[in-house]
């Protein structure tokens, strides 16, 4: 750096790899619920932002489900204009502190980044890390960047479910001047962001702050209000001009093997809800909802929820945490970073093991889990190699707790009360058209209640697309954009 | 928000009735459904079956027994105070037949739910017999309320201090064997009692609905803590129940599952008592 030059020219950072992010050591973090990646400081963030070569095509923008102008905000960070960068992100995404943490950037913006050339040993720009830095920067500096709210339209919008899809739609519609009310069945807002994602991945204080931002924009939150039960959907449809159903996933799946109702068997939802939403790790003096003292635990599954469960379990100080998965490492659906963190923390992976039975300890509780050892055979319908049992090879793991993290169906609470809302007969998910409108004209839907179970950012992307369509519906009566190209904007992403 | 307590009545030792402002639950709630409440920001989510409701007044009635930390804290609340969180109505309502003879068998705190059930059954034109059981006379609740509605009311106490001595099942069996043509039985109370009520009606082939009370966390179909085995199938009591065909319910599994957190529940209550004692000692020392 040249101190003598009055206006130092900005120098691009030509490093091939991402600026490293400091992490809490694995040995220390398994004793607490604090965050693992510690985030960038100003200098690290600037340095990483300067790796962006500002290429012509900007594939990252197309790779972002909510279409953030990534090169623009990176440029501002490079100039150390952090507030400007935040403003730029908030044009498209009001939850940067959350997305920077929980988005699978490696499958989205960073995957398509021009810099990303593993063959040349070059890593993508650390977009997610810089985004997270900005979210944290706003919090640390008490910066409230409330988007400008358009003049009131007099239209009333109801959002049912305050998870990522609902919060995004609420933000977009409030910005456009509509009066938005969000209904939530639970006692805290955020849906899966609160009950599912652990404190060490997304501190609840950050979520609450983002929710406060929405309140500042005039969004009204009604907690403890399960629509479908507390009020019929029909009644909500009469009270509001348009309704967005974002009730998310529900009903956890079980394996259907013997012993699943033994004491000590949890769905991942129950286990995570007890710890995250109810604060069970602080029982008995800091919270009233108990979590059992665990000695040996097996988590079944290999998605992000399984990693969250295994890593949460690790922090409850058991002797051992097993992860049991019937396929191999290659097929594990979780983010690489999460798998890596779980391993670092000492979660023992037992891959190619398929649970056969949960064994009773003689007192109605879990004593062990019996697993069939598997090997990989031919590819199946999903394109992944199918696990096949190795005859005669059965292993038993002595455990006192089993967490089943193999997915879940859509939330039944609203749909059960509203048979006229068209649903997929098999999956129970709500059916929508190309503009995310349901079979009821003033009802739109998005997020896991439509996809059956996807990621936070996909749900947010759908919240955004639905909000656009709902805005057009409110203003013109037609949810479709007359100027949109076929297959272009206005079509909802990744609905398969 | 604003679930204000408008009436508190002590029905029996450690057993209270609260009337609470909750207009939408009063409007939509039906017999057999439940609410989930919390008493503080660190509180657990506790399910309580609706005792009664007054849609005109916009209030619901809950009856609870102080058995743990949450219910003890609840019991300390006074008229004018608010319930921290209250969500409902959840679960499915009791299936109410028409033109039948139905026996409602309640025990202990469960008698609070017999009350709205009898009311709903009478409104639908049924003949309704209530059997209310309690350990002893002073624990018997809501007798007058039920008597005022039911065609016949039979009281049993375990110790014979009031009504007929013995179990509700004896009264039920005598009723059936005495020639009363019973079309249906609905039962709510301690799990062991419900188990034996179902066992009593089975030989007579009388359909029997049992209102189950498993442990719940969210109560909205999300966690599966409340799963029960009915006819060999796993069912979620919070969204598919809480009432199920009692002849198909695996009561022993339910009993085992209900006992799982007993050591923690005791620890929680002990810790709460200790805190209150320390606070009281503090107040004595530093008035």
Image (cartoon, rainbow, N blue to C red):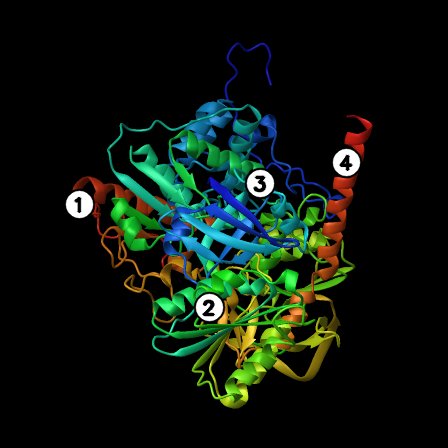
CA separation, marks 4 and 1? 64 Å
Q: Position of residue A127 (x, y in %)?
A: 50, 39
Q: Position of residue A309 (x, y in %)?
A: 63, 56
Q: Is residue A388 visible?
A: no
Q: Secondary structure at mark 4?
A: helix
* On-image quarter of the C terminus of chain A: bottom left
Q: Position of residue B204 (x, y in %)?
A: 50, 89
Closer-to-camera residue (B82/B1) = B82
Q: Residue at x 53, y 86 (%)?
A: B202
Instruction: Give the residue at the far right of this rendering.
Output: B285
Q: Which mark is residue B78?
A: 3
CA separation, marks 1 and 2? 38 Å
Residue identifier under label 2: B240
Q: Are marks 4 and 2 in contact (CB under 8 Å)?
A: no
Residue identifier under label 4: B280
Closer-to-camera residue (A488/A301) = A301
Residue identifier under label 1: A477
Crowding at mark 4 (Cα within 10 Å: few <14, some 14-19, many 20+): few
Q: Are marks 2 and 3 on the same chain?
A: yes
**First reached walking from the N terminus: tag 4 or tag 2:** 2
Q: Quadrant of residue B68?
A: bottom right
Q: Quadrant of residue A371?
A: bottom right
Q: Are marks 4 and 1 on the same chain?
A: no
Q: Secondary structure at mark 3?
A: loop
Q: Are marks 3 and 1 in contact (CB under 8 Å)?
A: no
Judged by depth in the image, the label closer to the viewer, 2 or 3, is: 3
**Vertical placement of residue A155 versus B246, above or below:** above
Q: Which mark is residue B10?
A: none
Judged by depth in the image, the label closer to the viewer, 1 or 2, is: 2
């Amino acid at each position: 750096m040249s101190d003598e030059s009055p206006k130092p020219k900005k120098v691009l950072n030509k490093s091939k790899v991402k600026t490293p992010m400091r992490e809490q050591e694995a040995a220390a973090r398994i004793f607490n619920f604090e965050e693992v990646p510690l985030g960038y400081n100003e200098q690290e963030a600037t340095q990483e932002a300067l790796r962006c070569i500002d290429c012509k095509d900007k594939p990252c923008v197309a790779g972002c489900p909510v279409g953030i102008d990534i090169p623009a905000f990176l440029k501002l960070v490079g100039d150390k204009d952090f507030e400007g960068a935040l403003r730029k992100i908030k044009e498209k995404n009001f939850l940067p502190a959350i997305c920077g943490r929980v988005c699978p950037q490696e499958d989205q913006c960073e995957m398509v980044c021009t810099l990303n050339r593993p063959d040349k040993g070059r890593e993508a720009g650390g977009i997610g890390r810089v985004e997270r830095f900005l979210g944290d920067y706003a919090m640390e500096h008490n910066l409230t960047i409330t988007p400008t709210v358009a003049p009131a339209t007099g239209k009333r919008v109801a959002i049912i479910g305050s998870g990522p899809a609902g919060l995004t739609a609420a933000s977009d519609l409030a910005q456009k001047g509509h009066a938005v009310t969000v209904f939530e069945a639970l006692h805290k807002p955020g849906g899966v962001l609160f009950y599912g994602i652990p404190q060490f991945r997304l501190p609840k204080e950050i979520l609450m702050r983002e929710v406060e931002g929405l309140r500042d924009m005039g969004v009204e939150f009604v907690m403890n209000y399960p629509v479908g039960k507390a009020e019929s959907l029909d009644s909500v449809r009469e009270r509001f001009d348009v309704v967005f159903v974002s009730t998310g996933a529900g009903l956890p799946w079980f394996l259907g093997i013997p012993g699943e109702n033994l004491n000590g068997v949890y769905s991942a939802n129950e286990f995570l809800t007890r710890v995250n939403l109810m604060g069970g790790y602080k029982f008995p003096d800091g919270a009233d909802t108990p979590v059992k003292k665990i000695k040996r635990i097996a988590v079944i599954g290999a998605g992000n929820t399984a990693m969250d469960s295994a890593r949460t379990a690790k922090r409850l100080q058991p002797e051992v945490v097993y992860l049991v998965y019937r396929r191999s490492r290659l097929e594990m659906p979780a983010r690489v970073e999460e798998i890596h963190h779980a391993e670092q923390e000492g979660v023992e992976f037992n891959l190619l093991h398929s649970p056969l039975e949960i064994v009773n300890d003689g007192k109605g509780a879990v004593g062990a889990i019996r697993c069939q050892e598997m090997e990989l055979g031919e590819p199946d319908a999903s394109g992944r190699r199918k696990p096949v049992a190795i005859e005669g090879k059965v292993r038993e793991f002595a455990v006192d707790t089993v967490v089943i993290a193999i997915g879940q169906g859509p939330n039944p609470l609203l749909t059960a009360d509203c048979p006229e809302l068209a649903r997929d007969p098999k999956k129970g998910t709500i059916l929508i058209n190309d503009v995310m409108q349901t079979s009821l004209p003033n009802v739109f839907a998005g997020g896991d209640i439509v996809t059956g179970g996807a990621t936070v950012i996909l749900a947010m992307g759908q919240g955004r697309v639905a909000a656009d369509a709902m805005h057009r519906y409110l203003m013109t009566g037609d949810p479709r954009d007359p100027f949109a190209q076929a297959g272009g904007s206005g079509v909802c992403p990744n609905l398969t | 928000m604003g679930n204000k307590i408008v009436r508190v009545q002590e029905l029996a030792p450690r057993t209270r009735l609260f009337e609470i402002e909750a207009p939408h639950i009063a409007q939509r709630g039906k017999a057999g459904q439940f609410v989930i409440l919390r008493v503080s920001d660190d509180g657990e989510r506790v399910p309580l079956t609706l005792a009664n409701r007054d849609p005109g007044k916009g209030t619901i009635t809950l009856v609870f027994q102080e058995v743990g930390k949450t219910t003890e804290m609840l019991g300390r609340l006074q008229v004018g105070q608010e319930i921290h969180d209250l969500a409902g109505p959840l679960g499915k309502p009791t299936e109410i037949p028409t033109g039948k003879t139905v026996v409602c068998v309640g025990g202990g705190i469960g008698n609070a739910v017999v009350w709205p059930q009898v009311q709903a059954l009478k409104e639908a034109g049924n003949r309704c017999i209530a059997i209310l059981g309690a350990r002893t006379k002073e624990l018997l609740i809501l007798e007058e309320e039920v008597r005022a509605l039911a065609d016949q009311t039979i009281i049993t106490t375990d110790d014979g201090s009031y009504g007929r001595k013995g179990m509700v099942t004896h009264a039920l069996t005598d009723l059936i064997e005495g020639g009363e043509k019973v079309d249906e039985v609905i039962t709510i109370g301690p799990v062991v009692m419900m188990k034996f009520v179902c066992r009593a009606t089975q030989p007579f082939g009388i359909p029997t609905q049992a209102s189950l009370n498993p442990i719940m966390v969210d109560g909205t179909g999300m966690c599966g803590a409340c799963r029960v085995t009915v006819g060999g199938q796993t069912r979620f009591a919070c969204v598919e129940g809480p009432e199920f065909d009692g002849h198909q319910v695996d009561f022993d599994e339910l009993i085992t599952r209900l006992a799982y957190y007993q050591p923690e529940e005791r620890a929680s209550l002990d810790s709460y008592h200790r805190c209150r004692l320390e606070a009281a000692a503090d107040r004595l020392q530093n008035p």
